[in-house]
Amino acid sequence: MALYVQKYGGTSVGSVERIEAVADKVKSFRAQGHDIVVVVSAMSGETNRLIALAKDIQEHPDSREMDVLISTGEQVTIALLAMALKKRGIDARSYTGGQVRILTDNAHSKARIQDIETQRIRTDLDAGRVVIVAGFQGVDADGNITTLGRGGSDTTGVALAAALKADECQIYTDVDGVYTTDPRVVASACRLEKITFEEMLEMASLGSKVLQIRSVEFAGKYKVPLRVLSSFKDGPGTLITTEDEDTVEKPIISGIAFNRDEAKLTVKGVPDLPGVASRILGPISRQNIEVDMIVQNVAADKTTDFTFTVHRNDYDKAYQILQQIVAELGAREYVGNKEIAKVSIVGVGMRSHAGVASKMFDTLAAENINILMISTSEIKVSVVIAEKYMELAVRALHAAFNLDKADTVCE
Ligand code: ADP
Ligand code: ASP
Ligand code: MG
């Protein structure tokens, strides 16, 4: 019999009815003799509601207190699920992250898991209990409650599966697997039977929020068998695996990711001298602003235009910093644009195929979509375009790379 760690997301525990349905599902796994550790998210919308409450008091609330607040959503669902299981005659026990103990660093709101004590869970499993753990939260060395970043319950699930050496970590959500792109944007997107850790990591990093980035990193590092499934309907879902031999047979592009969370800033007419990049990006990084894409080009007059993207939440801060350094640099002007989106094609098959990027550019050109920035790696090509064309670009690329259901068999 197997040990499964099953994570149920916000929609899957979004109401008492849904929690009862999860209890039925867990009961059926127990009936087959499997050991089950369940990780739950807060009810859908709850974490946002809690954040809004805090912001009503203060725009930037204290980060320690924020974690005390937003970790409460998961404490509600663990208890309700334990009650629903007990009602069904299944012995179950709920634990907060701190009770388990899921030890993290002290970076509030983006804490990293450092260690998980498994003894308490093992004792419960040996006694035939279902163990229910609150996702998204842990505790630092001083006993302060921490949270793992939005979508962090995925990481709790994977980390627990790694610590317990579970047979599989199953992420139950509101879609029945990982699709070639977000099925809410492209109706003809199709479910992938398998995807490599490497591709999934790119997809997640480039905007596919079906799995939190860190959960994929963790699963890849500790070789945790990971599956994304629907809690609403039965099916095999999508298995995230290590790369297999039949890569040659794989489609060149596995998926398309998109992201509306970035903004672009450009410093124009900077004298082209050594140290420009460091003088622009140094002050930005010292304010803890992460820079994603960077483009620099030199004009005939020996000046350079320097463009970079940051998270949209950091845009105002970055804009203010530029205001200060533009004069020091002797640059002509600086401009910013928040209405951008990043669209990326991802696939390990790209390694062995030329012309993938140019096919992407041709497809966008045929739709009259202007490309503002480009970045590539071995297994992805990303472009920045105007936000209003994002969905059009994703649909056109999905069709051009034969990912539409009619063209390819994903299942
Ligand atoms: P949960 O609350 O269960 O954690 P999320 O909302 O975090 O669920 O993740 C599931 C959502 O991810 C889906 O509803 C879907 O809209 C979105 N999504 C984005 N990209 C993809 C993709 N490539 N495949 C499947 N779902 C995707
Ligand atoms: N409840 C948290 C969030 O909404 C964590 C999670 O759902 O994974 O981000
Ligand atoms: Mg999620």
Image: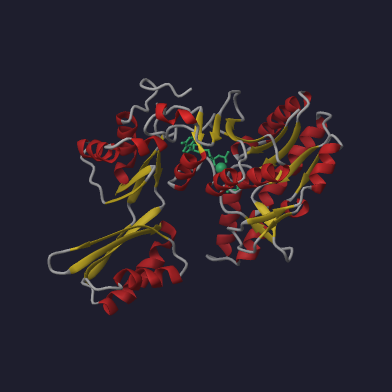
Q: Quadrant of the N terminus?
A: top right
Which residue: 48% across, 42% down?
A: 198
Q: Is residue 42 visible?
A: no
Furthest-right residue in this view = 127
Q: Is residue 105 visible?
A: yes
Which residue: 67% across, 53% down?
A: 137
- Above or below — where is 289 with respect to 12? below
Give x and y (percent) for residue 149: 57, 54
Furthest-left residue in this view = 300
Left or right: 26, with 171 as reference point: right
Give x and y (percent) for residue 174: 56, 33
Q: Nearer the viewer, residue 151 or 54?
A: 151
Furthest-bottom residue in this view = 328
Give x and y (percent) for residue 131: 77, 40
Asked where in the image residue 81 lies, by quadrant, the reply is top right
Q: Nearer the viewer, residue 376 or 188?
A: 376
- Above or below — where is 277 with respect to 165? below
Left or right: 213, with 280 as reference point: right
Q: Nearer the viewer, residue 276 or 130?
A: 276
Which residue: 72% across, 64% down?
A: 141
Left or right: 70, with 383 as reference point: right
Left or right: 317, with 80 as reference point: left
Q: Nearer the viewer, residue 273 or 180?
A: 273
Which residue: 54% across, 66% down?
A: 60
Give x and y (percent) for residue 379: 39, 42
Count of labels in the image: 0
